[in-house]
Image: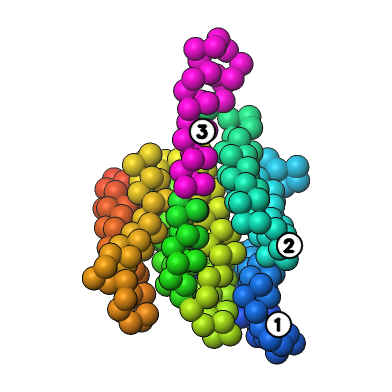
Amino acid sequence: MPDPVLYLQAMGFAAFASAMLIFIVVGAVHPVTLKWMNVASVLAIGLGLVVGYGLLAFRLNWPPANGLDRLLLVIVPATLVLELIVSCWSEPRRIAWLMRFFLAAAIPRILLPGSVHLDGFHGEARLLLKPVAELIACSVLLAGTWRMLSWLSERSGGCSIPLALALTIQCTGLTIMMAGYIKGGAATFPLTATLVATTLAASLAVKRSSITATIGIGMVELFGILFIGRFFGRISTGFALTMLVTPLLCWVSEFPTLRHRKPWLVGAVRLLLVAIPLIAALVLAKLDFDRAMTPLLGQLINV
């Protein structure tokens, strides 16, 4: 059964560990450049996830036995390493994005080995079309959303974009838990906490700058949780797509009437626009949960 106290503890310790690492880097490095902040952010998120998942006592298997194992033991570490390399290495930006696109293309295939959804790969040529099209579409959606959010962050900076992403991740986790995938939903709690703590701590050191590492790591885990919930759980395709693209509502702030407003106002508008569909999704999920639980509660009362 879900343990709210345990989730709060995991979030609190994950946030504390991430923020402390950022502050240690700020105190040790002078001057604190954007490059150092991206490096510190990757390390802080990694530390926060280790602390948070350790407190949740997740039982992960090696070699990975299911989608969540592959997400947390293969994909998330690979994303952390990639973002660390990109942050440390002064390579051309196009090479960095080529590496990210390659990872985005590989993620759906990594998450689905042994799944019935890949049965078509062993059949006739015509049966290949559906699974191949699904994997390609998923990769394109991940890469496109990742690129658009990073581009917006580079244009306007600030902390509202990763905070909007963190809000989306947490609402996704709650919704997935109500759909019956408890462990998958619980996996979002440490990530949300460490993203928020890292973003706020980094923003104190580097004003109005683009900490793209937080966006990449957040996008990958959001996609992974939605992908697993869609193909192995009970969430619908429409819900998964809605949650994945909801952070793109931050682009509304680029309209001429908003773009040159005060940063705090732009950030507030972004968070509000993202929160509206997330609240609607949570309400609908709660209604579905109540409808599913009512017959069970009635049976228990009759007993």
Amino acid type of the residue that numbered disc 2 sits on in the rendered structure:
Trp
Quadrant in the rendering for residue 230 = top left
Regarding mark 1 in the picture, which secondary structure is present there? helix
| In the image: residue 192, left or right of residue 45 | left
Q: Which residue corresponds to the image point at 26% horizontal and 68% vertical from the top-left?
A: 256
Q: Are marks 2 and 3 in contact (CB under 8 Å)?
A: no
Front residue of 234/149: it is: 149
Helix, strand or loop: magenta stretch: helix
Front residue of 47/263: it is: 263
Residue at which label 3 appears: 136
Question: Real-space Cα distance between discs 3 and 1?
Answer: 39 Å
Amino acid type of the residue that numbered disc 1 sits on in the rendered structure:
Val
Furthest-top residue in this view: 124
Look at discs 1 and 2 and give the one toward the viewer. 2
Furthest-left residue in this view: 257
Residue 198 in the image, given as x and y percentages of width and height: 57, 75
